[in-house]
Image (cartoon, helix red, strand yellow):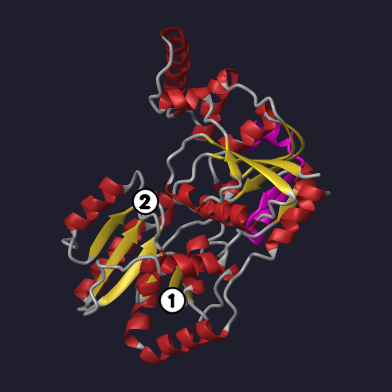
Amino acid sequence: MKKILLFVIDSLTIGGAEKSLVSLLNLIDYTKYDVDLLLFRKGGELEKYLPQSVNILPVPEYYRFNNKERFLFHEKLKFYYYRLKTLLNLRLNNYRMQSLHTEQIVFKNIKKILVPIQKKYDVAIAYSQGMPTYFVANKVTASKKLAWINTDYTNSLYNKEIDFESYKEIQKIITVSKHINKSVSQIREEYNKKVELILDIINPSLIYKMSNEHVVHEFDKSVINILTVGRLVTAKGYDMAIEVAKLLKSSGYKFKWFVIGEGPERNKLQNIIDKFELNSHFTLLGKKINPYPYMKNCDLYVQTSIKEGFGLTVSEAKILKRPIVCTNFPTAKEIINNNVDGLIVECDIHNIYKGIKKYLDDQSFKIKIIQELNTIEAYNSVNQLNKFYQLVQN
């Protein structure tokens, strides 16, 4: 008899957890599992890559209201009340001595209005910390509940005591890197007994296929094309990247640096680009449904992150055999063998600049790295699928 699984995630916009989930859903054996998927927002770019066997559930009413769907007047009044209450408490959160994570504020204020799912599941899986975990813990009936943590949770704004009330309802906490696994295990003794390591699911064959889907027109073959992929948020260190571009320009290097991703830092970053007169050297390309043709064709992939849950885009660039410079975020050494198949540098402007400069000045070093990338087996976490099966079967 098939097991019935539920996956919950905020949306399928482009992001590490989202890409990992889509890869997992494309690998699952649907002769053994029936799969439901709950999204809080539909319309994400990755939805088109979902297999047809996945049953997408209706978005919860409150989120549909926020997405401007039509409701009766009395229903609107109810939703307006909870939305205003949430907005007020989000504003007040800015004045706390210790601010809570936005997701914690939102869930506390809308918890009563979120209708539980009536269907019973064998296994319910929150594929991200925050709202998906709160929903699975409090609004889903299942024989077993799993919750993924795919960020540097211990160094996040999540209040760990508040979250414990939800994690008490979770049988297994899945972490996506050794660093996160160790740090989460140390939060509480109860977590140490629950934590399991399953690396982010990456399917190289899917990445190879997508990398050939279209031609890149933005790159200039007469210069070095540098690429970075990730949301425009503080944790990605783009302000440092722009400073590095300024140094490269002043040193006379011929290059163009492209960033794929969107986020709240766009205006701030564009202002810095304008200030340094780098518009012909540093370009924010925005969201791209498929970043892999850009990865495949760039001359150098650079990740300037201050922190990462795992570093999925670095792994993807490695699969596509690109020379890589990445900062020494906690999980970098789990992906890159420094000076062997890539370069890990300290997280500051000077060292990022030196790392890029090493590739540009020393062609023999660059050739050595590419040769190594072409001899090693592509990073492939498909074998992590067996760990997933063991969790849902036992």
Please name whichever residue, 143 or 233, is drawn nearer the observer in this view of the structure.
143
Q: Quadrant of residue 302?
A: bottom left
User: Which residue ends up furthest to the right in the rendered image?
Assistant: 394
10 Å crowding of disc 1: few (<14), some (14-19), many (20+) = many
Residue at horizontal 26 percent and vertical 46 percent from the top: 267
Q: Is residue 282 above or below residue 161?
A: below
Q: Nearer the viewer, residue 304 or 139?
A: 139
Describe residue 337's horizontal placement relative to residue 70 as left or right.
right
Outermost residue, bottom direction? 364
Question: Seen in the image, is 381 located left or right of residue 98?
Answer: right
Report which residue position mark 1 lands on.
Answer: 322
The three-letter code of the residue at mark 2 reads Leu
Residue drawn at x 55%, y 31% as measured from the top left: 104
Q: Position of residue 90 (x, y in %)?
A: 45, 26
Residue 300: horizontal and vertical position, in percent? 37, 75
What residue is disc 2 on?
232
Quarter of the image with the N terminus is top right
Number of labelled discs?
Answer: 2
**Seen in the image, is 253 located left or right of residue 162?**
left
Residue 145 in view of the camera: yes
Q: CA distance from mark 2 to mark 1?
A: 22 Å
Question: Which span of residues is magenta-colored?
Answer: 160-186
Q: Secondary structure at mark 1?
A: loop
Q: Is residue 178 magenta?
A: yes
Q: Position of residue 99 (x, y in %)?
A: 50, 33
- Within 10 Å of disc 2 (Cα), the crowding (few <14, some 14-19, many 20+) is many
Local SS, label 2 = loop
Q: Amino acid at mark 1?
A: Arg
Which residue shows up at 35% across the image and 49% down it?
262
Task: Name which of mark 2 and mark 1 comes first in the sequence.
Answer: 2
**Any magenta on residue 111?**
no
Rendering coords of residue 81 (x, y %)? 45, 13
